[in-house]
């Protein structure tokens, strides 16, 4: 972080209009991004609260606090809320909404009214879910597997599926808006291979949102209709096939994992570049790998169904296809690592999150390969190994990326810095808490503890206690930013571009004016064009920096050159 | 947000940019529709693979003449919609209004026929979840119920799209009547046209897959 | 200001086609005739029992009709590659949904009873 001496702009998007109407009827993508941020923060802490209740119950092998039914409701609500109402909208709807027009030099997204509409639809979906929480919950698991959900569950399945249906619709509209925006609203000179990698990853995310979500939507409606009218579509007693539900559900829900992680991959690319003061190594490969991940994500869903009585031949096919996803994911990790090499690395809060992300994403991805192999999955299916794996991707990956991005762009959004020391502390707490929560779960899962039970064999207790301890540390790590972010809105040090980062979004004022740019920006250079190796030696205060024949350490010199 | 004098919204620079954005946006929306109906067609294919005989026999309870008539209505309404768009492009307001009215007329006819079909099925106790009773061979009952459920769900979803389409059509008609469109700006007419053709396109697949499976069987599959 | 200069002139620049592209009345009526003939052909072929070919024939006619509508009525024949990519892409992913789902259903009956064949557990062998 670099000390700046700046003052807030006189008019910006936050103070240009006042009153609740100026927020609830806004079509400004920046304000809509903030609306989403407030909504998903509420959902995040609600879902996190259920996680803590789950972990509390698992402190001992017997049932202490809750019976099986209550516990079932808790893990279902934890999953439904955090997946559909936090992770799926998290980065795209908040950071994406805020940043896409800024990063591509546009005044707004292509369809501003549609953007607002999608927030309202999200709110309607959330209200359905909150209503479910209030009136007694749902106990099917976030996967709504049939025939339990359609025939046997005595909880509020229909309302919950409708909530998911609505939030899916909101997700579709956001994705559609982003695709058109990225295609049609780019500033002059901003060619595809000059786009920031965050834009590439959101573009890939939007493709999945647009193409996969409709299938989930109609599947949720079918579940509701089957439950309501008993027509037999998913009921084996009436000739229906519950496995068909799983196919249709996972056709969305596997790609949905990439809706959650791809934006984080994009954020991390931005962070790695900004905090190594270098162009991302292999830019084009990282950009295209996002698209590859999006496309591959559609052809691997069957790896969730190896033990579902799906044909083993289909299982073999899905197993082989699943390994494909590892390739573009690994391309990203290797390229980030190569970017770090000989970069001028600074360990500010966003970078701590990014580094944590790389480690956890790598481990999460590799354990995914274990689960993609059909033989090993027979042993590990529905154990805590799976839980640990996908929490590494979704929490260690997606949430870490979201937090890293929030810290990085916070001065952009509000013109003020969060307290850096507290930021680093909370990043550290999150990392420690996370690992303590989920590494033990790999072991207990491998040893055979199944998921979704509130009681377990006594020999698993030590590891479960570790996990619960870790989750409470994690909870503290998540509450700290909530406190200091709110604090910083008023008391934070005024900042414009404390990272001296490159990118169109940093060219305008912080916070940006309502129309984003006072005049249309014109792009003449690549993304991340950090002054690492100037063509000519540059003179700064009588000191010579940079130059051709200085392969090592030039990056650091470049940063000084910029700051001086 | 758009300026009262200009059809170009504030965040676009040119009308071309706005038009192209709308076109891609509409096509992406139609892509979601393709996957939405596509999921149902997949379910249809799975159950038809599982219950080939039941689907054939149940399908012979459909009145293919009604379905065929409706196919014709939709095709005609698509053609009038094409003419409506080209009238708008040439700035012929009268032609635009006339062809829009014709499109709405044939769309409404479709729904009227659909209504009578549904009523007929209701009286025949063909509606799963409401009054389904299978009088044919008992081993076909499950498959037939799923067939009729898919029939009602898919044609119902299609009819819902028709209703929404007719609502939009009324809006387009009124705005055209008020003189909002010109050869420079007739985006909404064109986008609505895409939607309308898509709804037609779905029906083109629904018709043979739902109505004609058992067309070579006697009505009721010989069980009546 | 590449956007403005390219578009505000109104000329098809850089190989872009002009945005105005409606089909002629003759083409439209020819397509209409083809669609009606297709509908009649669907009904006619359905009245015959073609055995295994019943569905492929019906689907082929439907796909032909749909293609006509997409290409002519929905202007894809005259549109930019971006629009065409969206159309092709959505059908591609529909085929993925269809194909991989059927990779299960078409091979399910061929799945052998694995526990009974390969397990050393005598309980499983009895099943």
Image (spheres, grey):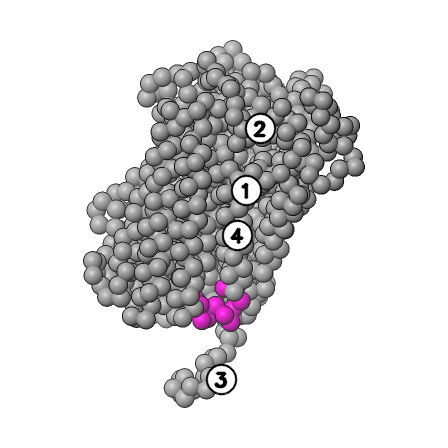
Discs 1, 4: same chain: yes
Graded by Cα atoms within 10 Å as few (under 14), some (14 to 19) or many (20 or more), the crowding at tag 2 reads some
Q: Position of residue A454 (x, y in %)?
A: 27, 62
At 34% from the left edge and 44% from the top edge, which residue is drawn?
A476
Looking at the rendering, in which quadrant would you find the N terminus of chain C? top right
Find out whether the residues at labels 4 and 3 contact each other: C-beta distance under 8 Å: no
Q: Which residue is mark 3?
A: C117
Q: Which residues are magenta?
A: A371-383
> Which residue is identified by label 2?
A500
Whether residue A71 appears in this view of the structure is yes
The image position of residue A282, as x and y in percent, is 68, 44
Q: Secondary structure at mark 2?
A: loop
Q: Quadrant of the C terminus of chain C?
A: bottom left
Which element is circle 1 on? Answer: helix
Q: Are marks 4 and 2 on the same chain?
A: yes
Q: Which residue is mark 4?
A: A359
Mark 1 = which residue? A268
Q: Nearer the viewer, residue A109 or B155?
A: A109
Left or right: residue A51 versus residue A425 is left
């Amino acid at each position: 972080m670099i000390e700046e001496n700046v003052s807030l702009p006189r008019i910006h998007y936050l103070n240009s209009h006042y009153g609740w109407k100026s927020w609830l009827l806004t079509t400004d993508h920046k304000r809509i991004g903030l609306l989403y941020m407030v909504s998903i923060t509420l959902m995040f802490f609600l879902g996190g609260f259920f996680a803590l209740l789950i972990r509390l119950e698992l402190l001992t092998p017997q049932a202490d606090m809750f019976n099986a039914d209550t516990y079932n409701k808790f893990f279902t609500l934890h999953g439904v809320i955090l997946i559909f109402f936090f992770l799926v909208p998290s980065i795209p709807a908040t950071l994406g909404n805020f940043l896409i027009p800024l990063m591509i030099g546009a005044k707004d997204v292509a369809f501003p009214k549609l953007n607002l509409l999608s927030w309202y639809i999200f709110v309607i979906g959330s209200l359905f879910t909150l209503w479910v929480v209030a009136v007694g919950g749902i106990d099917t698991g976030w996967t709504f597997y049939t025939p339990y959900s359609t025939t046997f569950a005595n909880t509020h399945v229909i309302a919950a599926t409708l909530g998911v249906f609505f939030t899916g619709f909101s997700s579709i509209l956001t994705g559609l808006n982003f695709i058109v925006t990225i295609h049609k609203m780019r500033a002059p000179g901003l060619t595809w291979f000059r786009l920031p990698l965050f834009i590439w990853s959101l573009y890939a995310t939007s493709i999945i949102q647009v193409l996969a979500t409709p299938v989930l939507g109609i599947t949720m409606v079918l579940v509701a209709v089957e439950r309501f009218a008993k027509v037999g579509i998913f009921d084996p007693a009436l000739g229906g096939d519950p496995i068909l539900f799983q196919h249709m559900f996972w056709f969305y829900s596997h790609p949905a994992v990439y809706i959650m992680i791809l934006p984080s991959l994009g954020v991390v690319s931005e962070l790695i570049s900004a905090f190594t003061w270098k162009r991302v190594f292999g830019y084009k490969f990282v950009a295209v790998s996002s698209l590859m991940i999006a496309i591959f994500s559609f052809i691997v869903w069957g790896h969730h169904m190896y033990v579902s009585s799906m044909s083993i031949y289909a299982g073999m096919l899905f197993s082989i296809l699943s390994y494909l996803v590892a390739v573009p994911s690994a391309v990203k990790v290797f390229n980030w690592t190569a970017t770090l090499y000989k970069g001028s690395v600074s360990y500010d809060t966003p970078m701590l999150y990014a580094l944590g992300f790389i480690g956890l994403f790598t481990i999460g991805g590799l354990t995914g390969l274990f689960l993609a192999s059909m033989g090993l999955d027979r042993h590990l299916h529905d154990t805590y190994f799976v839980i640990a794996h996908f929490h590494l991707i979704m929490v260690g990956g997606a949430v870490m990326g979201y937090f890293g991005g929030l810290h990085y762009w916070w001065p952009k959004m509000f013109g003020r810095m969060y307290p850096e020391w507290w930021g680093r502390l909370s990043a550290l707490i999150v990392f420690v808490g996370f690992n303590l929560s989920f590494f033990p779960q790999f072991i207990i899962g491998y040893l055979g503890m199944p998921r979704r039970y509130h009681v377990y064999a006594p020999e698993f207790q030590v590891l479960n206690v570790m996990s619960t301890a870790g989750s409470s540390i994690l909870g503290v790590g998540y509450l700290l930013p909530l406190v200091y972010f709110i604090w910083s809105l008023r008391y934070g040090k005024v900042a414009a571009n404390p990272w001296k980062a490159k990118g169109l979004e940093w060219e305008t004022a912080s916070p940006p004016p309502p129309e984003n740019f006072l005049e249309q920006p014109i792009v003449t250079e690549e993304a991340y064009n950090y002054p690492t190796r100037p063509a000519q030696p540059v003179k700064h205060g009588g000191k010579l920096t940079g130059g051709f024949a200085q392969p090592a350490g030039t990056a650091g010199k470049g940063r000084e050159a910029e700051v001086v | 947000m758009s300026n009262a004098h200009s059809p170009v919204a504030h965040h676009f620079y040119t009308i071309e940019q706005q038009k192209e954005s709308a076109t891609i946006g509409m096509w992406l929306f139609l892509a979601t529709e393709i996957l939405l109906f596509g999921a149902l067609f997949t379910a249809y294919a799975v159950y038809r693979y599982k219950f080939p005989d039941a689907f054939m026999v149940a399908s012979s309870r459909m009145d293919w003449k009604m379905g065929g008539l409706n196919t014709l209505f939709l095709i005609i309404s698509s053609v009038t919609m094409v003419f409506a768009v080209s009238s708008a492009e040439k700035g012929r307001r009268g032609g635009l209004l006339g062809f829009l009215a014709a499109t709405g007329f044939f769309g409404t006819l479709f729904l009227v026929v659909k209504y009578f079909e549904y009523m007929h099925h209701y009286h025949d106790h063909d509606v799963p979840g409401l009054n389904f009773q299978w009088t044919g061979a008992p081993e076909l009952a499950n498959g037939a119920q799923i067939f009729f459920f898919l029939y009602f769900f898919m044609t119902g979803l299609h009819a819902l799209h028709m209703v929404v389409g007719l609502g939009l059509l009324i809006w387009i008609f009124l705005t055209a009547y008020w003189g909002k469109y010109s050869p420079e700006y007739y985006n909404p007419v064109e986008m609505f046209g895409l939607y309308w053709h898509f709804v037609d396109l779905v029906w083109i697949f629904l018709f043979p897959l739902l109505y004609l499976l058992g067309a070579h069987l006697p009505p009721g599959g010989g069980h009546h | 200001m590449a956007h403005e200069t390219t578009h505000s002139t109104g000329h098809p620049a850089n190989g872009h086609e002009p945005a105005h592209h409606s089909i002629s009345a003759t083409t439209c009526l020819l397509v209409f005739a083809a669609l009606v003939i297709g509908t009649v052909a669907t009904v006619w072929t359905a009245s015959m029992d073609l055995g295994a070919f019943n569905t492929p024939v019906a689907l082929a006619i439907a796909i032909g009709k749909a293609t006509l509508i997409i290409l002519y009525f929905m202007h894809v024949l005259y549109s930019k590659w971006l629009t065409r990519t969206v159309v092709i892409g959505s059908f591609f992913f529909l085929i993925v949904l269809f194909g991989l789902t059927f990779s299960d259903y078409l091979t399910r009956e061929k799945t052998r009873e694995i526990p009974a064949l390969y397990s050393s557990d005598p309980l499983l062998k009895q099943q």
